[in-house]
Image (spheres, rainbow, N blue to C red):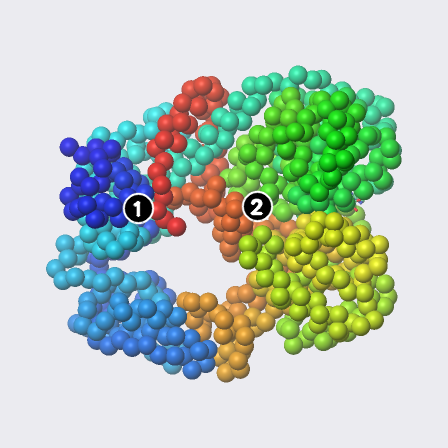
């Protein structure tokens, strides 16, 4: 009998060698194969005749036939490798075209039979062709003909058909499979039992559009299980933290209100007031606060956090403010010193502090003398102890994970935690990432902010831009020039930055030009930043180290080179570095992805030559713009950070959007947090309800079982 635990080598069709291959991919038992889902289906019941393709323009269809010719060539315009084949069935023939996949020549050969899945379209010359279709070699008398065929991702050298048979064998384990979701929870989630869902996924009898879009009841069952597992695990963890009730009373009296009013150099916006109230309510509740404070760049998060800090300090507790970089620590430290004007004992903690500086700081934190400490992650080191840490404020959540949170927790008696982010996270993603956070949003900018003029320009216009920059400097402006060098990258190549720096220095001989990048020591970076702030530098040529939070009100032009290489949210962060003072401000995006139009008209374009595989000459937008150009234009028109973030998320998907380090935590096997966000909300509501109804201990049991049911996902 085959059970979920049966090792794959006992399945029919699996010998020692195939077992080894499957195991290499994490498929060791029948159970793993059950959870190894097809990434699409092919309806082989109704192949389309080639003669009918004209009726299916731009619609993905299946055609079957024999390859009657195949050859590689070089495209005359873009120097792109093209592989062309002609497929023939009993009704006609059609051209198949693949771009930049020269290896296909070894796999698609004349005389072989193929199933082709793709959308026919008209070429520039009016001929019917299918570009970049999916393909599968077809070996004679297929039992699959006339069925809906699941298509699995490749596992080593196991032929697709053999792999399908092996997975089908594993379905025998279904009757012995336990459903980790109890019936009452299934009801709340509106999903059916597991076994029939798995069967339907591997052996569908019906194919409709909903199925293709992963919207069948079977898909929903799996997606909701993953989302629910995630949400319940988050909630359970949070609940067990909450079990530790806070052991402090936070009072807000008139003298404190007066003091807060005194430090405020301006009137709070309505949104800021609302958020202050939400936070103060949390501070006063007996459950530890875990709140995400979102607000667009410049919306004034710092002052809100500082008000919370004041209240905590006046109640006799310490506050820690964590920032991701030393520059930001320095900036917070100075701004807070100015605002608080010695009414609070303030200290800073960074990794570059000398032992002589560290000792008194540690002592001051331990005995409670230091009331507010601003620091990098150096604050999370084991040696740092607080007398009574009441509130931890984390600026820029992107580098702050669960593990850090736990370390913070260990530093105090259930400290309240406020995480601030200047990168607006779309609601769908916030829910998925931080199902256990409360959310506060500052959705209003302080009055008097002027719009930053954003423009997209080609590098041929650089000289005109430089002229403009020169005039602006003459009237007192300062300039950022940013190169697309990813600071976290291990093989950091600073050459483009250095060349750019030299070029700009040569172009502006009478101006002060400086360079900054992540390879410099923190002290050097800081010194450079201070000189820029002090107005001693006119043009700061930099990598994205200036991306988060830096505040130089006099800087009014942000020039971004090769802007198409940045994500939209990153561009928005960079743009937020200007427009922070009274000067009219500009964000100039330089990009040469001036599209297929240039390329098609025969002019060589650097961007076109380096265009990545799979691109086609028809990639341009309807008006000839490249997708990159369209993306940048859209950014130039959009001022709202949330809108930018939402677009960015749609365009790049959550992994890219969050940066690779974060994406692992959000890798759902089937669920897509953007597409399926309302399922995520349902999962979240259900998790809350289950926790309420069944209590922490029992919910933890369910979560554990669900987590145990997870298996390695092979999908990459
Ligand atoms: P961010 O949300 O990007 O961290 P900051 O807290 O740095 O924004 O605030 C941006 C700027 O706006 C700061 O110079 C701050 O002093 C100013 N600011 C904040 N709130 C207000 C307000 N209500 N009215 C006027 N200026 C404000
Ligand atoms: Mg800030």
Mark 1 secondary-structure assignment: helix
Which residue does the numbered mark 1 point to in the structure image? 24
Q: Position of residue 598 (x, y in %)?
A: 53, 78
- State which mark lies toward you, 2 or 1: 1
Residue 238 shown left or right of residue 129 in the figure: right
Q: Which of pointers 2 and 1 lies earlier in the amino acid sequence?
A: 1
Q: Nearer the viewer, residue 164 or 63?
A: 164
Give the class, few, some or many, for how many residues have Cα within 10 Å of label 1's Cα (few <14, many ≥20): few
Q: Is mark 2 within 8 Å of ligand 1?
A: no
- Point 40% across, 23% down: residue: 701
With 669 as the anchor, is 461 left or right in this view? Answer: right
Is 205 placed above or below 250 here? Answer: below
Q: Position of residue 113 (x, y in %)?
A: 19, 67
Q: Position of residue 125 (x, y in %)?
A: 38, 81
Image quadrant of ligand 1 equals top right
Numbered tag placed on residue 226 in the rendering: none
Residue found at x 52% / y 44%: 662
Indicate the quadrant where residue 587 lies: bottom right
Q: Secondary structure at mark 2?
A: loop
- Closer to us: 190 or 181: 181
- Point 51% across, 52% down: residue: 656
Q: Which residue is mark 2?
A: 426
Q: Residue at position x 74%, y 39% from top? A: 354
Q: Position of residue 72 (x, y in %)?
A: 32, 77
């Amino acid at each position: 009998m085959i059970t979920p635990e049966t090792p794959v080598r006992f399945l029919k069709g699996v010998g020692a060698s195939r077992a080894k291959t499957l195991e290499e991919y994490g498929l060791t038992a029948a159970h793993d194969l059950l959870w190894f889902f097809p990434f699409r289906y092919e309806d082989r019941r109704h192949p389309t005749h080639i003669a009918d393709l004209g009726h299916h323009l731009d619609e993905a269809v299946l055609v079957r036939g024999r390859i009657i010719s195949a050859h590689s060539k070089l495209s005359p315009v873009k120097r792109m490798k093209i592989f062309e084949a002609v497929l023939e069935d009993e009704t006609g023939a059609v051209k198949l075209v693949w771009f930049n996949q020269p290896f296909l020549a070894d796999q698609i050969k004349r005389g072989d039979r193929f199933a082709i899945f793709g959308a026919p379209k008209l070429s520039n010359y009016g001929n019917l062709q299918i570009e970049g279709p999916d393909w599968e070699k077809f070996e004679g008398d297929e039992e699959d003909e006339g069925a809906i065929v699941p298509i699995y991702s490749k596992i080593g050298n196991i032929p697709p058909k053999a792999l399908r048979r092996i997975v089908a064998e594993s379905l025998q384990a279904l009757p012995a499979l336990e459903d980790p979701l109890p019936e009452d929870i299934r009801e709340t989630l509106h999903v059916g039992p597991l076994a029939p869902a798995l069967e339907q996924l591997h052996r569908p009898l019906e194919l409709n559009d909903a199925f293709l879009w992963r919207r069948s009841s079977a898909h929903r069952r799996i997606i909701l299980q993953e989302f629910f597992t995630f949400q319940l695990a988050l909630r359970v963890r949070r609940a067990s933290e909450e079990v530790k009730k806070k052991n402090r009373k936070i009072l807000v009296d008139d003298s404190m209100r007066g003091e807060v009013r005194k430090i405020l150099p301006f009137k709070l916006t309505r949104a800021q007031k609302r958020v202050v109230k939400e936070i103060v309510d949390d501070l006063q509740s007996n459950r530890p606060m875990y709140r995400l404070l979102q607000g667009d760049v410049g919306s004034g998060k710092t002052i809100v956090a500082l008000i919370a800090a004041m209240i905590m300090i006046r109640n006799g507790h310490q506050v820690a403010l964590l920032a991701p970089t030393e520059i930001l620590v320095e900036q917070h430290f100075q701004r807070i010193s100015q605002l608080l004007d010695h009414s609070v004992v303030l200290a800073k903690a960074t990794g570059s502090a000398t032992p002589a500086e560290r000792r008194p700081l540690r002592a001051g934190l331990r005995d409670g003398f230091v009331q507010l400490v601003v620091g990098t992650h150096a604050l999370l080191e084991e040696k740092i102890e607080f007398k009574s840490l009441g509130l931890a404020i984390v600026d820029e959540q992107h580098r702050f994970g669960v593990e850090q949170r736990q370390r913070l927790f260990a530093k105090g008696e259930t400290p309240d935690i406020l995480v601030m982010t200047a990168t607006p996270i779309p609601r769908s993603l916030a829910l998925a990432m931080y199902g256990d956070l409360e959310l506060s949003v500052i959705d209003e900018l302080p009055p008097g902010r002027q719009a930053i003029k954003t423009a997209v320009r080609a590098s041929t216009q650089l000289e005109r831009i430089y002229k403009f920059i020169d005039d602006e400097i003459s009237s007192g402006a300062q300039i950022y020039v940013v190169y697309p060098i990813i600071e976290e990258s291990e093989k950091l190549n600073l050459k483009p930055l250095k060349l750019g720096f030299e070029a700009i220095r040569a172009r502006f001989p009478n101006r002060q030009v400086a360079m900054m990048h992540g390879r410099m020591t923190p002290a050097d970076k800081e010194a450079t930043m201070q000189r820029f702030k002090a107005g001693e530098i006119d043009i700061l040529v930099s990598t994205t180290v200036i991306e988060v939070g830096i505040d130089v009100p006099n800087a009014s032009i942000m020039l971004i080179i090769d802007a198409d290489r940045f994500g939209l949210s990153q561009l928005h962060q960079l743009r937020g570095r200007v427009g922070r003072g009274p000067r009219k401000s500009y964000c100039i995006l330089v990009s040469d992805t001036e599209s297929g139009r240039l390329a098609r008209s025969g002019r060589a374009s650097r961007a076109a030559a380096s265009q990545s595989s799979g691109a086609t000459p028809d990639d341009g937008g309807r008006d000839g713009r490249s997708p990159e150009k369209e993306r940048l234009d859209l950014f130039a028109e959009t001022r709202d950070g949330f809108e930018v973030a939402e677009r960015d998320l749609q365009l790049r998907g959550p992994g890219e959007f969050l940066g690779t380090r974060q994406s692992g935590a959000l890798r759902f096997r089937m669920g897509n947090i953007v597409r399926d966000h309302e399922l995520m909300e349902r999962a979240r509501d259900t998790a809350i309800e289950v926790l309420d109804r069944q209590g922490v201990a029992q919910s933890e049991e369910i979560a554990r079982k669900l987590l145990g049911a997870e298996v390695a996902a092979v999908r990459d």
